[in-house]
Image (cartoon, helix red, strand yellow):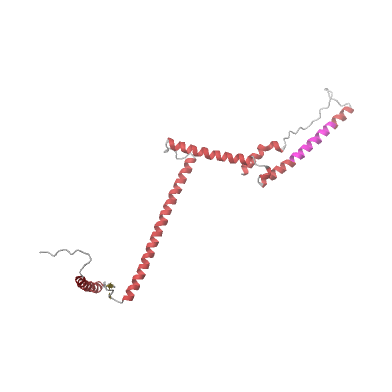
Amino acid sequence: MGRGKIVIRRIDNTTTRQVTFSKRRNGLLKKAKELAVLCDAEVGLIIFSSTSRLYDYASTSMKSVIERYNKTNEDHQLTMHLNSELKFWQREAATLRQQLHNLQENHRQMMGVDTNGLGFEELQSLENKLETSLHSIRNKKVFILNISPDQLPPSVNLMHRENMELYKTINLSRHENMKIYQKVNTTGRQNGGFTSSGSLSPTSIDLELSPPQQQTSEMEEEVTKLG
């Protein structure tokens, strides 16, 4: 007749519990000694009874076994931490690679490339995004074109001042040309040097100038280029 299985639970009877503890403790110590001898292993065993009595065994010395255990445990925890950190950065790198891939794909689609696989709704969404971006760019362009000369960049402001000086110089030359024309015309009349039509026809240069206020379109194009 076979031996029945013993239920592993706390023994209620104090005497039976103490006897069982003594037998199994001796058996555990015996197995530890055999393991150390047969397998050339460093074994340390510590047992506290229910009455707080200490029983221990060490194949070398309990101090060396505990020190070796602490060092191994620290190394194990450090390794676990490094592995955990490595896995974390690997996940971060994978996430960044995926984000970069998505950004590159969106950029190609914005440029009109790789749109063959897009459906109608996706193309509609892409069109809306492009229209929104274009509207924002136009608003920025209008804002730059409407700023006052004092708010222009230094290079554009300098060009504006040079344009003003050039306009004044050419306008002055135009007035001098008109005075010379009138003087020559008057002298010709006094000397009787009229043409068949009854007046002199000296060669005159008509300079069609527009003040800087009317040259806004040219400045706007220059501002756009510099911007």
Toward which corner of the image does residue 3 lie, by quadrant? bottom left
Q: Is residue 211 found left or right of 89 in the rendered image?
A: right
> Is residue 180 found inside the magenta-colored segment of the image?
yes
Pick the residue in front: 29 or 186.
29
Q: Position of residue 136 (x, y in %)?
A: 55, 40
Above or below, 69 relative to 84: below
Residue at 80 percent of width and 34 percent of height: 177
Task: Name the image quarter holding the N terminus.
Answer: bottom left
**Residue 115 rendering spot, x and y as whole percentages:** 44, 38
Using the image as rendered, state which of residue 209 and residue 27 is in the foreground. 27
The residue furthest left is: 1
Q: Picture coordinates of residue 37 (x, y %)? A: 24, 74
- Residue 181 position (above or below residue 17): above
Image coordinates for residue 67, horizontal then vertical, percent = 35, 73
33 on left or right of 161: left
For the C terminus, which image quadrant?
top right
| Residue that sits furthest to the top in the current view | 196
Q: Is residue 56 visible?
A: no
Q: Quadrant of residue 210?
A: top right
Q: Residue at x 37, y 65 (%)?
A: 77
Residue 135 is inside the magenta segment: no
Q: Which stretch appears magenta?
A: 166-182
34, above or below 220, in the image: below
Q: Does residue 90 appear to the left or right of 144 in the view shown?
A: left
Residue furthest out toward the bottom: 61
Residue 87 in view in this figure: yes
